[in-house]
């Protein structure tokens, strides 16, 4: 027998406090109506498919991990492609809501659906009424009189205001992933790094940062290079961490890097020697910054 669901739909980039409020509501509705819980999200995000300037807050690895920690019965990630984006609002409703056995739907008041975002709340309400689906529209979630949104979190991360971003995320800002083999550039620079898999996606900020990482229940500070490597003409975004006072092999392990503060912007140096000098300066600056976090 197929299960029926209380569900919500969205990008859930960041899984911030507003998202958590939505998910809490579907869990309450599911318990009250003897339903299971479902979160429908997208990969790639629509803004990635359309190549808008907007960039990610979190990786799929982190989003799935966080949603699973919230004990959702079914997390469904829809591939946002040409076929999906060309669905009419009614086709989207039938394929993504009716056929998914959703009986209770909770969404934010800005929800749009179907080709060119042409479906609105009024149409959604009509479709839900005609298909015996209960619809609940949530108002904006606010903290300290401020609307909590992924846009707000992106703006704070772009300013390296990790403490303020964490207030709206409900947790310290961190990026997780498996340690993978890199190009050994760190060893060429006498600064070995752990390269973290970030799913080949672009995030909303970059630079050189002080971070903190937990390995086998022990905390270590690290210098994080997040973004392209312009000195080596490598302009893909990557995440690598030089872990201070640590020399063990951690390939294939899943690590989470908490971002604490920014050390500097990324710079294209004229030579590897110039970069080595800067890295030594970064280590000195990090040693001073660490005192604020010990």
Image: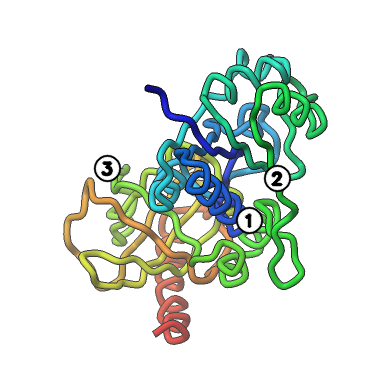
Q: Quadrant of the N terminus?
A: top left
Relative side of 114 to 39, left or right: right
Give the quarter of the image for residue 290.
bottom left
Task: Report how far apart the C-alphas of labels 3 and 2 lie in the structure.
Answer: 41 Å
The residue at 74%/29% (across/down) is 124
What sort of colour scheme is used for the picture? rainbow
Classify 63 as above or below 82.
below
Query: Which residue is painted at 58% across and 23% down in the image?
Result: 96
Q: Which mark is residue 279?
A: none
The residue that mark 2 highlights is: 108
Q: Position of residue 104 (x, y in %)?
A: 59, 37
Q: Position of residue 16 (x, y in %)?
A: 58, 56
Q: Secondary structure at mark 1?
A: helix
Asked if 74 appears above or below 283 in the picture, the reply is above
The residue pinned by badge 3 equals 181
Name the quadrant containing residue 80. top right
**Number of the label disc, if any, that sits on residue 18:** 1
Name the residue nearer the viewer: 193 or 59. Answer: 59
Tell me whether circle 2 and circle 1 mark residues in contact (CB < 8 Å): yes
Tag 1 or tag 2, which sits nearer the N-term?
A: 1
């Amino acid at each position: 027998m197929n299960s029926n669901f209380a569900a919500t739909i969205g990008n859930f980039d960041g899984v911030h406090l507003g998202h958590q409020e939505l998910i809490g509501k579907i869990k309450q509705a599911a318990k009250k109506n003897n339903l299971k819980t479902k979160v429908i999200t997208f990969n790639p995000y629509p803004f990635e498919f359309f190549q808008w300037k907007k960039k990610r807050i979190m990786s799929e690895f982190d989003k799935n991990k966080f949603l699973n920690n919230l004990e959702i019965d079914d997390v469904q990630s829809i591939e946002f492609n040409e076929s999906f984006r060309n669905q009419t609002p009614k086709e989207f409703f039938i394929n993504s809501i009716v056929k998914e056995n959703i009986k209770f739907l909770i969404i934010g008041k800005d929800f749009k659906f179907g080709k060119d975002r042409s479906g609105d709340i009024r149409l959604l309400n009509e479709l839900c009424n005609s298909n015996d689906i209960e619809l609940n529209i949530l108002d904006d979630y606010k903290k300290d009189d401020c609307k909590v949104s992924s846009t707000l979190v992106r703006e704070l991360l772009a300013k390296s205001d990790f403490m303020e971003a964490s207030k709206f995320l409900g947790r310290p800002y961190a990026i997780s992933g498996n340690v993978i083999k890199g190009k050994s550039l760190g060893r060429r620079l006498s600064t070995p790094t752990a390269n973290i898999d970030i799913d080949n996606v672009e995030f909303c900020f970059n630079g050189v940062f002080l971070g903190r990482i937990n390995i086998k229940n022990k905390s270590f500070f690290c210098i994080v290079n997040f973004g392209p490597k312009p000195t080596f003409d490598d302009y893909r975004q990557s995440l690598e961490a030089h872990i201070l006072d640590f020399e063990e092999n951690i390939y294939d392990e899943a690590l989470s890097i908490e971002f604490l503060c920014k050390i500097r912007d990324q710079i294209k140096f004229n030579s590897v020697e110039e970069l080595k000098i800067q890295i030594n300066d970064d280590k000195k600056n990090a040693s001073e910054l660490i005192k604020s976090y010990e």
